[in-house]
Amino acid sequence: MKNKAIFLDRDGVLNHERNDYICRLEDFEVLEYQIPVLKKFYDEGYLLVIITNQGGIALGRYTEETLSEMHKLLFQKFEQQGAKISHAYYCPHHPSVTGECPCRKPKSGMLLTAIQTYNIDPALSVMIGDKLRDVEAANGAGVKGILIKPDEKISYDKIKEVLST
């Protein structure tokens, strides 16, 4: 049997959008009001999977170790409220440094990897993001994309409605 997933952009969806790279752990502010809604989906059997561009790594603004600390904090906040994030996929590349890559959104590489790794049915899954590139990446992988405003509270009913279409 295939799994179903809620794919999540990170900045502006799971943590406060700063309109710049988050380079230090102390600037990483988890939007804890998102967790109860996502826990409902977790309890319904959805995998929670982060899909995030982290071009600041290629630009030398922060390290993969710092990113790992941010994700550890994010995972802990979810686990404290009874939900588990399965994986955080990230693209460390930046076009100005590394050129084009298949994983950087709006391309679908990270989603396709997650779908294969976790045996996910794209038709039963959604991607929530605060930028059009999130929706484009989702659609390219056969997943429905949901666009929210930066730091907007995720609507359980809206996601359920999209999943039912």
Image (tube, rainbow, N blue to C red):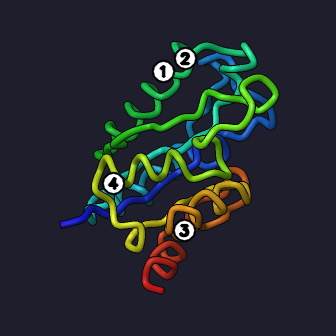
Mark 2 vs mark 1: give the one in front: 2
Label 2 close to label 1 by CB (< 8 Å): yes
Circle 4/circle 2 CB separation < 8 Å: no
Which numbered tag is attached to residue 155?
A: 3
- Left or right, 160 with reference to 108: left
For image coordinates 55% across by 17% down, the residue present is 64
Instruction: Assign a secondary structure to mark 3.
Output: loop
Task: Identify the mark nearer the N-term, 3 or 2.
Answer: 2
Task: Please tell me which of labels 3 and 4 falls first in the chain.
Answer: 4
* Residue identified by numbered label 4: 47
Q: Nearer the viewer, mark 3 or mark 1?
A: 1
Looking at the rendered structure, the kind of residue marked 4 is Leu
Q: What's the distance in space between the residues labelled 4 and 2, CA to CA?
A: 24 Å
Mark 1 secondary-structure assignment: helix
Circle 2 residues within 10 Å: few <14, some 14–19, many ≥20: some
Q: Position of residue 81 (x, y in %)?
A: 34, 44
| Nearer to us in this view, 36 or 12 | 12
Disc 3 to disc 1, how far (Cα)? 28 Å
Q: Mark 3: which amino acid?
A: Ser
Which amino acid type corresponds to the residue marked 2 in the rendered image? Glu
- Separation of marks 4 and 1 at Cα, in angstroms: 20 Å
The x and y percentages for residue 150 are 72, 52
Residue at image mark 1: 68
Q: Earlier in the sequence, mark 4 or mark 1?
A: 4
